[in-house]
């Protein structure tokens, strides 16, 4: 009987814990400034109980490259080649440029509330015709204008988000870093709450049976 209690309580705790409203703010520019510039095949971040893993891809060769934290009011970009100290070489190749994508994968379903971008010169002004392509959970990609602030009031919900640079121009106004990102956890559907209610009811029945038997 104790085993049943343990399982029910454990499942209920997981259910209720996963439903709690969570929000996270990832300030990649601040992280780079405080922890130093660095790159790797994967970079991991955590805030507000939400975990995030960053990866990057060379779209021309379909080869993995390195997500990269660049300091000096920059943020999270991508770099093809790292030196022995995990620094980008050349240093100018540390943003998301032509035929590169930066992917952010979360440990749960989230809604992007806001993204801030900076350009190749760490500024907030992009070329008028600059765009990026967003893919969510491997669904059909959508094209968006490159702007300093993106995502407010939009329905950007999923676990995996890929930001691709398909611009033909390689000028600074067509390149980008993700400077900051704010997300919120997506609540569990009503069916999950019904399942949780069933678990709690089962626990009550088990307790009553135990009381009768004793």
Image: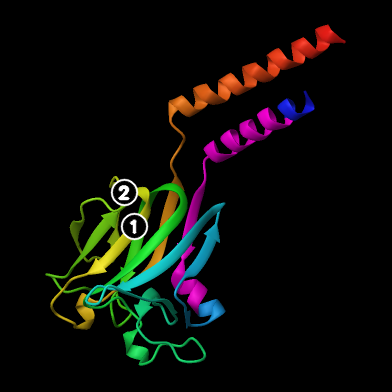
Q: Is residue 162 magenta?
A: no
Residue appearing at x 42%, y 56% in the figure: 182
Reading the chain from its start, which is encountered first: label 1 or label 2? 2
From where the camera sits, is residue 177 visible? no
For residue 36, above or below residue 90:
above
Q: Which residues are magenta?
A: 6-32
Residue appearing at x 49%, y 72% in the figure: 30
Residue 206 in the image, given as x and y percentages of width and height: 72, 16
Question: 199 left or right of 130?
Answer: right
Residue 207 in the image, given as x and y percentages of width and height: 76, 16
Q: Is residue 27 magenta?
A: yes
Cα gap from disc 1 to disc 2, whole angstroms: 9 Å
Return the mark for residue 193: none
Contact (CB < 8 A) between labels 1 and 2? yes
Residue appearing at x 50%, y 22% in the figure: 194
Residue 76 in the image, given as x and y percentages of width and height: 40, 73
Main secondary structure type of the part rendered in magenta:
helix
Badge 1: residue crowd in 10 Å (few <14, some 14–19, many ≥20): many
For residue 124, above or below residue 157:
below
Work out which quarter of the rendered image holds the C terminus and state it.
Answer: top right
Residue that badge 2 annotates: 156
Q: Quadrant of residue 65?
A: bottom left
Residue appearing at x 45%, y 91% in the figure: 83
């Amino acid at each position: 009987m104790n085993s049943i209690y343990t399982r029910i309580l454990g499942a209920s705790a997981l259910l209720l814990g996963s439903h709690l409203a969570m929000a996270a703010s990832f300030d990649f520019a601040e992280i780079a400034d405080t922890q130093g510039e660095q790159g790797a095949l994967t970079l991991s971040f955590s805030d507000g109980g939400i975990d995030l893993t960053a990866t990057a891809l060379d779209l021309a060769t379909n080869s993995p490259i390195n997500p990269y934290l660049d300091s000096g009011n920059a943020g999270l970009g991508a770099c093809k080649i790292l030196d022995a100290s995990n620094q980008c070489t050349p240093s100018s190749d540390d943003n998301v440029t032509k035929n590169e994508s930066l992917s952010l994968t979360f440990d749960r379903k989230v809604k992007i509330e806001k993204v801030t971008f900076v350009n190749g010169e760490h500024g907030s002004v992009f070329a008028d015709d600059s765009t990026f392509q967003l893919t969510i959970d491997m669904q059909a990609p959508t094209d968006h204008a490159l702007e300093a602030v993106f995502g407010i009031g939009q329905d950007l919900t999923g676990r995996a988000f890929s930001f691709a640079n398909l611009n033909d121009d390689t000028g600074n106004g067509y390149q980008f870093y993700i400077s900051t990102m704010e997300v919120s956890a997506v609540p569990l559907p009503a069916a999950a709450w019904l399942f949780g209610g069933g678990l709690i009811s089962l626990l009550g029945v088990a307790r009553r049976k135990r009381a009768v038997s004793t």
